[in-house]
Image (cartoon, grey):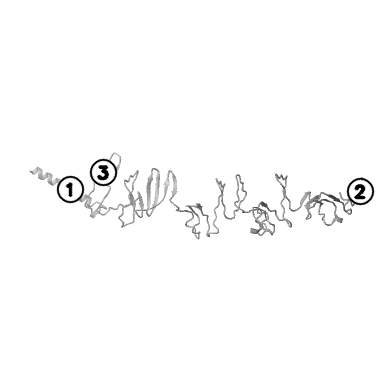
Amino acid sequence: MYVIIVIFIILVISYLSIYFSYKHKEGFNSNLVDIIPIQISSENDIITVPNKINGFQGNAITMDDLNVKNTTVHKGRTFLKPVGEDLNPDIDFAIGDKKTGFNREDTGIVSFWGNGQKIGTYGTTGMTLQKNLPMEFGKDIENKNVDAGKIFYTTTGLEIIGAGNQGTNRKVRIQDNLDVGNNLIVPGATELNETILKGNTQIVGNKKLEFGANEAKTQSNSGTIVYKINSDTNSDTTTLDATALNIVGAEGGGSRKIHLWDDVEVDSNLRVKGSIRIGTAEEYWNIKVQPDGSLHFLYKETSPGDIDNDKGRITLTKEGNIRLAKANFPGMITDNLKNISDNPC
């Protein structure tokens, strides 16, 4: 009987010693009523804590300056929530509210969310953005145009909007080679410097290809190549042909001119409405059809109407007659053998 009483007294003293040692330990919350078992393994230095630690009346225990070393595995969803909110997260790692943060999509793929909306994914398959959500560069730039620096997907194409503070001065600059695999469509003006075209180039409709656009021109269309257009839709003094490819020469203080440096080969008919000049700058002949249908070969600037001053003229009439003239001898053919005068050939 005495043995039993002694054992009981020892157990009571042991319990009270353990209780007061925990209760008065530094930093221990006196409101705690439950001591939750903590498993400590001496083999691998692992401390196992239950999924939920509650203090007085179920209040959460706050741990300050928690230093976790080595690998930590948390099973279940994680929620970094504001103080005072008691919500269960809808995604794997919620931040601020239960619908904003990160979620595991698949092996190696993580999605990021904002207020319950899936923004995009990142992982082994690359980076994606949902629907037409934009990616914006220079968000914090002062006075930036509202759409400047954005890249987003639309039904008409991938929109890349340049930098700038206005909608009219935005600019995209590509430092190195630009390789376009298909058509390059430019609705506005395009400034090209040292451009090499290795494939087919198309100008749609009757749009112009203009050379020397920065020159002070007095006539419209000078230096342009235009497909099938006429004067009804063009203010040029020269009537352009609505059935042809029109090549308009450059201005040079007088008549516009196209200079072909080498041989010109024409597979079909060559039609000339004006004159043809053959020769050098110093010695040349002009060939031109006159209003009466005759063809005149005129040496230099000889006027076909001023026969007395002609230095050289050959006339081929539409009836088949040929007339040759020498200065001061109108209608005369002369050589060392004989003179023929006033007799048409």
Location of residue 43 in the rendering, given as x and y in whole percent from the top left corner: 29, 39
In terms of depth relative to the viewer, which is nearer, 294 or 137? 294
The residue under the point 20% across, 50% down is 19
Location of residue 34 in the rendering, given as x and y in whole percent from the top left corner: 22, 50
Report the amino acid beneath label 2: Asn
The residue under the point 10% across, 43% down is 4
The residue under the point 37% across, 48% down is 103
Which label belongs to residue 39? 3
133 vs 259, left or right, is: left
Is residue 282 in view from this perspective? Answer: no
How crowded pointer 1 is (Cα within 10 Å; few <14, some 14-19, many 20+) is rated as few
Above or below, 71 against 171 in this view is above
231 vs 109, left or right, is: right
Q: Which residue is mark 1?
A: 15
- The Cα–Cα distance between marks 3 and 2, rounded to whole angstroms, is 138 Å
In terms of depth relative to the viewer, which is nearer, 100 or 265? 265
Instruction: Give the total of numbered labels.
Output: 3
Which label belongs to residue 339? 2
Label 1: element kind: helix
Most distant residue in the front direction: 319
Which one is closest to the eye, mark 3 or mark 2?
Answer: 2
